[in-house]
Image: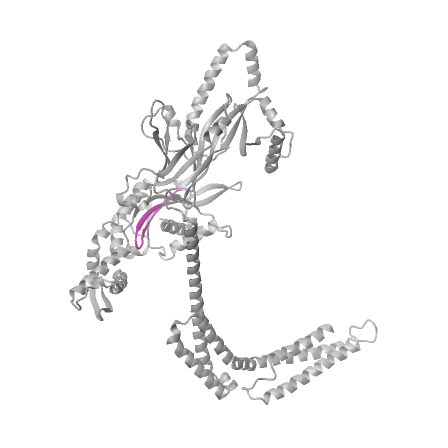
Amino acid sequence: MLCSFAVALNYGIFRRKDFNESAQYIMFYDMGATSTTATVVSYQLVKTKEKGYVETNPQLSIIGIGYDRTLGGLEMQLRLRDFLGKKFNEMKKTSNDVFKNPRAMAKLFKEAGRVKNVLSANADHYAQVEGLLDDQDFKLQVTREEFEGMCSDLFDRVKRPIDQALKSSGLTLDVISHVILVGAGTRVPKVQEKLSEAVGMELGKSINTDEAAAMGAVYKAADLSNGFKVKKFLTKDAVLFPIQVIFERDVEGSTSPKHVKRTLFGQMNPYPQKKILTFNKHQNDFSFHVAYAELDHLSNFEVQALGPLNLSKVELTGVAEALAKHQGNNVESKGIKAHFAMDESGLLNLANVELVVEKTLTEEELAAQEESPLSKLGSTISNFFTGKCDLTKKSSFIISVSKGYFSSYTLQSGSEKKEKVEEKPVAEEPDEGKKSEQETKEGKTDEEEKKEEKPSQQERQEGESEEKKKEATPEEAKNATKAANGDKKPKVVVVKEAITSTEEKLGVPELGENLFQDAVKKIESLNEFDRQRSRRASALNALESFVFDAQGKLWLDEYQAAATPEEVEKIKQTCSEVSDWLYEEGSDADAATYEAKLSELKTLTGPLYRRVKEHMERPEALAALHSMINGSSNFLANARNMTTDSPDGLFTQVELDMLEKVIKETQEWKTKMEEEQSSLPASVTPKLTVKSITDKMALLDREVKIE
């Protein structure tokens, strides 16, 4: 499934200009080695708010998935391998059974893979293996028709993932604009034939199946990383298997508790996403399980492949103490809220659990709270981060400390709409069947509670207003009128109290400390093995290249002229010995041995290579020195014309005499060294080196700059 997601992302990245506000639906059919997946994807432009600005970005959403866990190219290759093995036994070339020889079966498996690929483009091909068993060769002509016959039941299953994907997405084929092929298994002609019959349209083959998934994964990794900046391409994956929360609740009049199930994430719900589940009726510590929900649409094989159906168990403690801490006529409990988050990787985590209550406070109580030093500090901190520095105004955010907990209060007027500080969750699907008011409220998400709470609260307020109109005295009516006019408005604060939660993972067990350290050591050993293998390959390549290069250079005129016959013979002999060693006992040597051999060769050839380099670079260096001498002489001549005896002259006579001396010495040195070097044979270490020439040029240049 992750492979199809990466391919879909790669497809959308290079076609982002083709998308608009209307959704475009594309199906990706991915047949790999061991499994097949059909994924329905929608592309469209959506508006998002980023850092206060509204941006329009393309979004990829997975809206339908179908799969076959055992349909793939590997099964076809295994069947062809067994077919070849059966034919070899029928030839009676040996009394031994090829199926009992693992080495022979490995050869047949490799040949079956090659033949399968060739049959995708040819009607027939020969399968042949030299020395398959007991030194007996095997050769057999295999036709595409025979191959398709032995895999006919596999080809009949090609359509199933498409039907599943369309059913889960709620779409029909007429709204699918393209069906894109992915994976090496889709190259089989019979697979494409079955797909064309199923979808009734031309199949898309524009995706590079070898690199599309890798490119999409790299783009997503760069997007998640803080070290890279890429163009925004929003993604929404889908929950394949529904997840529910299971807990127990005591029922009045019954001795046994009632088991309650609440769907947390339904099938094909998008993620990443956060949800909040509310428990209203628990007064003491309790626990709940997170597990897969109804899986009736899956076969027993698929259910077993999922592993443990219970994902985790959560224990909540300190419930009674938290409830007792917030009691009173002006307190209304909003239940215990468990915050769940499904991240980009599809991993479900319990973020935190808290008790949420609403307190109705009068102006006097609010004023008393605001006068406390801690409240002033909380107001100051709040104003500091919000940019409000007027400490004379009442704070809209107070931080109070009680028994080691930090509780946040959101102040609101009683007539204003109550505002939750937690994030708005996606509504949970209600349970089937009729339930009492008490049953339906337990385990609801916040969104469902708001829908149920709003009319009941309005009815309660209307009922209270009618009673007050009937029973209120003139004085009370006057006070009520003042309160209604804003003289004394009650305030509502939302208080959150943390509940201690302990989560036990029941799925794949986590590695213990010893196993974890063993795994780390194993990974490090594998990394070290890779490093040594890379080092060995580099050293072997460097040694081979140097040997071939040295043997070739010895035939060049400039190298023969710069070397003595004995030196040439020594280098040739050593290179020949190293070359023979490489293809015999040295083929399995380690990196250190190759590096040592290379160092010996460099030491042997170093003097010759340096002499050749000197002879090749000397003429250019001498030409540069000659040009500098001429330039310095011209500069000296011009400088003498501009020199006077007055104090304001540009150059003194001493400076000019010194420059003339340096120019003369450099010219004499150049003439002398050229004569000595010309008298020496090319095979002798040169006296006139490029370094000595550049040193003279630097000395002359420094003297000119001083002037």
In this rendering, does residue 226 appear at all?
yes
**Residue 37 painted magenta:** yes
Q: Is residue 173 visible?
A: no
Query: From the viewer's perspective, is 648 left or right of 612?
Result: right
Q: Give the range drawn in magenta.
A: 22-40
Q: Is residue 387 left or right of residue 534?
A: right
Instruction: Describe residue 164's horizontal placement relative to residue 597 as left or right.
Output: left
Residue drawn at (33%, 24%) of the image:
254
Q: Using the image, determine if residue 129 lies above or below residue 581.
A: above
Residue occupying image coordinates x 52% and y 85%? 562
Quarter of the image with the C terminus is bottom right
* Dominant secondary structure of the residues highlighted in magenta in the image: strand
Q: Tell me residue 354's x, y (percent).
A: 47, 33
Q: Residue furthest toward the bottom? A: 679
**Residue 548: quadrant of the picture:** bottom left
Give the number of callouts: 0
* 36 vs 575: above or below: above
Q: Tell which of 575 and 453 is nearer to you.
A: 575
Q: In this view, does 696 lie above or below 67?
A: below
Q: How is the image coloured?
A: one colour
| Spot occupied by residue 347 in the image (x, y as percentages of width and height) | 41, 44
Name the residue nearer the viewer: 692 or 704. Answer: 692
Residue at the extreme right: 646
Where residue 287 sits: x, y (%)? Answer: 40, 34
Q: Does the magenta run of residues contain 98?
A: no
User: Image height check: is 190 above or below 315?
Assistant: below
In-front residue for pair 205/477: 477
Residue 622's image quarter? bottom right
- Residue at coordinates 47% horizontally, 16% vertically from top-left? 464
Q: Where is residue 92 in the image (x, y as percent from the top left)?
A: 15, 67
